Image (tube, rainbow, N blue to C red):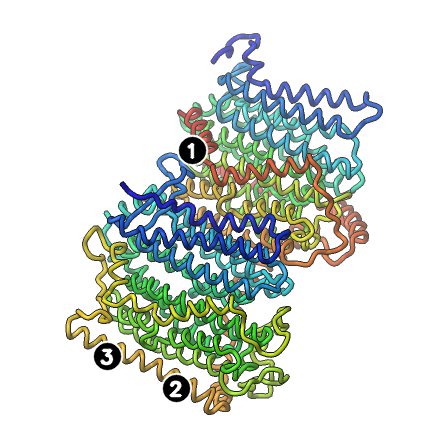
Amino acid sequence: MNGSLAMVPQATDYLRVLPEIVLSIFGMAIMFADPLLKERPPRTLGTLALLGSLLALAATWVQAQYPGFAFWNMVRVDAFSVFFHFLIVAVTAVVILTSFEYMEVEGIRAGEYYGLILLGAVGMSLMSSAVELVLIFLALEISSIATYILAGFRRRAAISSEASLKYFLLGSFATAFFLYGVALMFGATGSTSIQVIGAALSSFEVPALAYAGIALMFVGLAFKVAAAPFHIWTPDVYEGAPAPVVGFMSTAPKAAVFAVLLRLMFEAHAPGRIGLIWVVAALSMTLGNLGALVQNNVKRLLAYSSIAHAGYLLVAFAAVPDSGIPAAMFYAASYAAMNVGAFAVVSHFSNAGERYVKIEDYSGLSSSSPLLAAILTVFLLSLIGIPITGGFIAKFYVFSAALQSNLVGLVILGVLNSAVAAYYYLRVIVVMYMREPRGEVPVSAVPAGMGAAMAVSLAATIYLGVLPGRVLDYAGRAVAEWLH
Amino acid sequence: MSPNFHLWLIPLLPLLGAAINGLFGWRFSRQLVSAVALTFSGAAFALGLWVATQFPSLGTGLYRESSAVWIRAGDFQADFGFYLDQLSLIMLLIVAGVGFLIHIYSVGYMWEEGGFYRFFSYLNLFLFFMLTLILASNYLLMFVGWEGVGLASYLLIGFWFTRDQAASAGKKAFIVNRVGDFGFLIGLFLLIKHFGSLDFETLFASIRLHSPETQGAGLLTSIALLLMLGACGKSAQIPLYVWLPDAMEGPTPVSALIHAATMVTAGVYMIARSHVIYDRAPAAGMMVAILGTLTAFFAATMGMTQTDIKKVLAYSTISQLGYMFLACGVAAYTAGIFHLMTHAFFKGLLFLAAGAVMHATGGEQDMRNMGGLRTKIPWTFWSMTAATVAICGIPPFAGFFSKDEILWQAYASARGSWLYWLFGVITAGMTAFYMFRLWFLTFFGEYRGGRAEAHLPAQPGGRGSGHAGGDDPHRVPSPSHGQGGIHESPKVMLVPMVILAVLSVVGGWVSYHHTFENFLSPVFREGGTDSLVETRPTSTGVESPVEEGGKETLFMTISVGAAAIGIFLAWLLYLRRPAWPDRIAHRMWGLYQTVLHKYYVDELYAALFVKPLINGSTNLLWRGIDQNVIDAGADQSADLTRRLSDSLRHMQSGNLRSYAGWVALGAAAVIGYMVWIGIP
């Protein structure tokens, strides 16, 4: 509790938010530099952003050396928060790499794009270490507003502005739920600190008001992770937003919100957890997979797939904390690896104006660009959950954690769902490998930045599948340290 | 001091071959591609043989090695570990040996096809996964192989992807198998939950503490049934057999290797490996036996009406796998594995020979357009003959010993029943019938190829060649095969066939004096004593009690007699009186049509599962909620404008408001639920 009672923040307090500070500085620097640079070489600001995210990665390491509370118990640095910091910042760096090519091809010169990514990452990182509801709300808003704007960056495409507007309006609607939930929770327990709330909810009889508070907060957060029945916005927004941004917003903010949900569900001892999660997870898996079955647009397909994956991940929330939390953490990491990777390929392949985003456009990719096809295949196989990929181990862990908590019905539903899901991912693979190439779809060479992004995601996906031990151990230790 | 077998090398060698050919194959000459593929698959086989020679020195008959920890979480741990006992040794020799032979054959068969390097890369990849499957020391690693062979099979079925049927057949195989894997996975989760381990030794040691669940169905029964579902998918048993006939779209060596000799037997291997569970779950064992019997029987009836040479063999494979299931179900695992081995020889050979026939006739697969090939391709003819006699169970060919053993155990085992035996014998008769039908149609009579309307059992009712023509969609001969007249295959294809022919003849003799049985029995024994479920030895050895021996001789005579009747009928109908089949089909029109259309199971599944799923997805979700429909047919520019106007229209028409409505509705439900449970 070092520094928790002092009125003036101490040096260690700042060290405990070092990644956020680094990201903010770089984010703002890019915003300022943008109008100052007359002749804007398109990559300068991007490179600066990349540098910022890499430094933030280093800052995460520094931060990890100072576990404990900061800023009057509003921030808690522990292995759990470090895990998510690392994940979010790494995803940010990879997404910046994938954006270089996209920005050039689309002719977008706006530097604030990179600035917004970094600032969004500030909010997301802060969400994973904030243990006070008002701070969580602020972090959530920082992250959300950045992604609202990012979704509309294809300025020449009306569909993109529409996506941005829809996301903004519905997103604010959802955030309002969250805020009401915070207010009710304050009313019920007299505090906004997760720790205090947790103590209150486990010590005396839980007032109905607390149930309502949890319900409202859950609605807001479920919207952000695109869990059913709050998933409606997802396909439209993912289809309209720029491909690299979708790669970003389907992974990093989701991971951050899952971190908040984990804290809320397990540390705050949220009542009524299992029943609520059961239904939402079941709905998300089923609706996501059914919706994906008939999609012809790869981005929409991946949107529905991300709804389904939110469902799989939520299954872990219904499990007992000791096995459920590590399973959820691992799932978030491996989903981030494979999904960012998949969107990197989609973004490279889509070409100027995102012209080639239909499944048929991928016809014969295996002969026109065997390597690209092979890479995308690995990501898709991982999304299906085929062994020796991260996706398999992740599903395996989530379902076995759930079964250990006697959630037999949910597990059966989940495994059945993942059997159905094979169909639509496979459609893409079939088209790539078993159709004649279409002459008119150009496949350009993969530039270095994009190549690096794909390589990192690929390596992470396979690493998590073949040698998941270290990550799992870390997640397990994080939970032990956090809960016991 | 125990020897180090370096088992991990055995699967890894073919993987290396796959990687080399996959990455650099496009630059290699065909010679080099084949050299790489053969070297690595051959090396795996050689290593397997070496391990086999060293095996007796183990004494214990058990060997395991652990390369690295794969997953560890809490108490649960799974390794990259390999395990060798008599069972996996036999599987290893079958898979690596037959696999190597078929690699050789493929060099000749695929020589002039496009994608030569790709083919061998996939084939080596398949071997890698298959060897992982059989050598794994725990269920999880086994599952890696299990999914991997499915993937390789999928790639190979769809190898000729320009045919639409090939691509969709591959997909069907993959998805039907996912249904099976669903059972397998849940079974594994249950094992973890209750026993905390998936490692064979640890797991089986703790399961051995349980007594058999004779009263009703308990935990072990549920696990056994779930694993059985997985096995049904992989080994094409009822209700999941539908993918295998379609899988014949793949190149013929693939059908021989994957869809006859090795991969499809993985389910049988898995059940035999899990015998500790099945021994304690008699109800699940009975289910396996019943499914096996039914599959054997119905697949045989379907085999009798097919006219595509590969489809006949496909149904025959399903039927023979049914026998193996039956054996496992009555706890006669040795008999099941024995049949698995002889089947790998003769069915692998049957496919290779069928490939040679197709090679000779320019890609023809319809037996109605064959005939009289006996003298034109003698090597193929004689190999095929050996395999055909073997599968029919005529002594002293390989199939006789293994099938007889299964039929005897089906009756005599403590879990047996005369009903299993009866169905088994009838199936044996049908097997002989459809196999000799194939043999007569292909090799005897006059050559009917080249004539346009040459279809032997002409359709009554004037339907002409519409009959079953739909079953063999690729009449288009594959490129390359077919120039010139009918010709014998090159040596590179004939040598593997001759080797397998020899094995089809002599392969069953290993059961003499129970050699095979005694070798395998330590695996299925319970802690030094006999197996939990009593099975009785056969008299292919000598020392059975007199009474039992007499009974068994009688049974044996009956099953050989059934085969003889089947052969006689085939001779009568397809050589002696070729007009009769039509008349019979006409007489029993309804039955004939039902069987010809494979009991309409594909249609049933489509109506029951596929259509509702797609319709539900389309109507309920897509049209109902997600209105942003994009027409796939529209061209790009028109599409864009239309999308613009569409999206604007939707914005105005309240798309957003309806979305917000859904969110509000969901929120109301969540809040309602929470408040409801929150109010004391």
Q: What count of labels does the image hold? A: 3
**Label 3 sits on what residue type?**
Leu
SS label for mark 2: helix
**Residue B270: x %, y % from top left:** 37, 55
Give the class, few, some or many, for how many residues have Cα within 10 Å of label 3's Cα (few <14, many ≥20).
Answer: few
Residue at coordinates 55% horizontally, 36% vertically from top-left? A460
Give the class, few, some or many, for how many residues have Cα within 10 Å of label 2's Cα (few <14, many ≥20).
Answer: some
Q: Nearer the viewer, mark 1 or mark 2?
A: 2
Give the class, few, some or many, for how many residues have Cα within 10 Å of label 1's Cα (few <14, many ≥20).
Answer: many
SS label for mark 3: helix
**Label 1 sits on what residue type?**
Pro
- Residue named by callout 3: B554
Relative to A353, is A177 above or below?
Answer: above
**Residue B381: x %, y % from top left:** 47, 77
Label at residue A321: 1
**Residue A245: x %, y % from top left:** 68, 36
